[in-house]
Each structure stands twice: as C-alpha cells, then as structure tokens.
Image (cartoon, grey):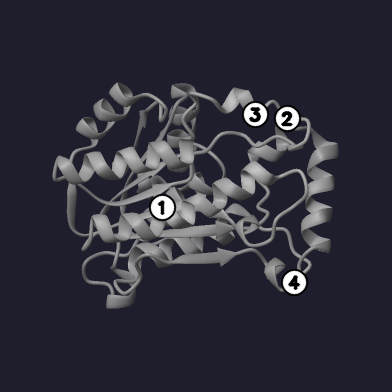
Amino acid sequence: MPIPNESSSPSLRHLVGKLVVVVGGSSGMGFAVARSSLEQGAKVIIASSNKAKVDAAVTRLIQANSAFKGSVSGLTVDAKDVPSLEKFWDEVGKFDHLVWTAGDSLGMPNFLTDDLTKKLNQPDVRMFGAAFSVQYAQKMDLFNPGASVTLTGGYVAHKPRKGWTMEVAGAGAIEALTRGLALEVAPVRVNSIGSGSVETEMWAAAGPQVVEYLKAAAIQGSPLQHCGQPEEIAEAYLFMMKCPMMTGSTVYVESGALLI
C-alpha cells in the first residue's frame, strides 16, 4: 500500500510527517488509530503500561506493512503515576497529535452491588492521565503548531444503562473535560469521541460467551444492526486530527444507538 507523502494531494497529506502519540495504542481502538495514522504518512508513538504488549504491537504494525518501519515506536507509561507521566512526555518531546484511548477495564458493572470505595484514591486513567498530560505538554511547550488532542468517552453519557451509573458519569465527565481543555490550551484543539460498542481484545479477555452477548446487544441496540470494529471507529479519530475547525466537540460513533 502506498503511503501519502508531501507531494500527495492536499486531502491526503494532512498527517504526513506529523508525530501522533497514541496512549492506549497497544490494542483495540488505539492500535487501529496507530495503524490508520501510519497509513496516512504519520510517525507514531504507541504507549501503554505493558512493555511486552507495546513491543508486540510495534512488531505487528511493521509486519502488516514494511513501509511502517522507522515510523513507529513504542514507550511505556503508567497513566496513574505522575513521575511516570512526566518521564514519558519528556521522552516524547514535541509532538503534533495526542490520541488518548487508554482506560481501565469496565468489566460488567452493577452499581447497586459494586464496591464504590475501591474508587477512592484511585485516579481514573481516562480523566487524570489525559488531563495531566495536556497540562504538562502545555507547560513544557511540547505542542507543535496545529496540534490536537482527542479523548475517548462513550455514548452512554446520553443513553444511560442500569448498573452503569459510574461509567455513565465518567463518560459525561470526558465530554466536560473536552470543552474545558479546549478553552484552556487553545489554539491547540481538543475533541473527544463518544464511542459505541466496539469489539476489541478487552471483550475477548472476558470470554467467548461475554463476547457473543455484547455483540448481540450491539446489533439489537442500533438501527444499523452493527457491532463496531476498531478500524471503523479509527476513522473518527483521523477526522478529529485532520479537521482544523473542530475543537471542544464530541462526535458520537455508535452505529446510531442514540436514535433508538
């Protein structure tokens, strides 16, 4: 597959030579965003807390397309730990786009029986890690001109599910954080994706029966009768990186589930 370059038409070269940092990029949606960004001619750093998974993801990308060699690398970071985050961003240096897909595994929540005390003194990866990273990057002047940040929330912020109260609150908080950060660090653009059901390795870890249940629920719960795939939702992240008029916005990519 040919990779866009500086002589490509304007619509194809938005990301050519840009450095895209994908925190959560070793699997799932983040991995798909990393691959799509490389296909657009970007340079990519993928990051997660597990070095073995990061190294394996870099290898998978290069095996998928030998043209990616030299354009993709990996780093580890503990998104709940301030020194780890600072060290990570010091290693990254100046960059163009941050995509944050990292988050704690949700499991199968049940608000009335979940032990909410476990959340005390435990930073939320999606909120704290992302907010601290943006603050630190701004303070250290790491954003290149035209930079953007894209966070990840969920459409459940507007379509609550019984048992998911804390997850609904978290998704709503991401949207509020997006709008606040967009004002704080302008002209750096800050947006978010309100994700619907997307079949990822996180599902697979829960076992085949859970995967089938989640897929069936996604199909039945959307007018498209479709369960999302990582490479499909990756297109939304590309749009957020490439469109210079988007900031403070959330785009819902949920197969129309909000309609029914």
Q: Which residue is mark 1?
A: 177
Q: Quadrant of residue 225?
A: bottom right
Q: How many marks?
A: 4
Q: Are marks 4 and 3 in contact (CB under 8 Å)?
A: no
Q: Is residue 86 visible?
A: yes
* Residue kind at label 4, given as amino acid type: Leu
Q: Which residue is mark 3?
A: 116
Q: Which residue is mark 4?
A: 224
Cα distance, mark 1 to mark 3?
Answer: 22 Å
- For marks 4 and 2, the one nearer the N-term is 2
Cα distance, mark 4 to mark 1?
Answer: 30 Å
- For marks 2 and 1, the one nearer the N-term is 2
Q: Which mark is residue 114?
A: 2
Cα distance, mark 2 to mark 3?
Answer: 6 Å
Depth check, mark 4 against mark 1: the one in front is 1
- For marks 1 and 3, the one nearer the N-term is 3
Residue at x 34%, y 71% (from the top left corner): 243
Q: Are marks 2 and 3 in contact (CB under 8 Å)?
A: yes
Residue at x 84%, y 62% (from the top left corner): 220
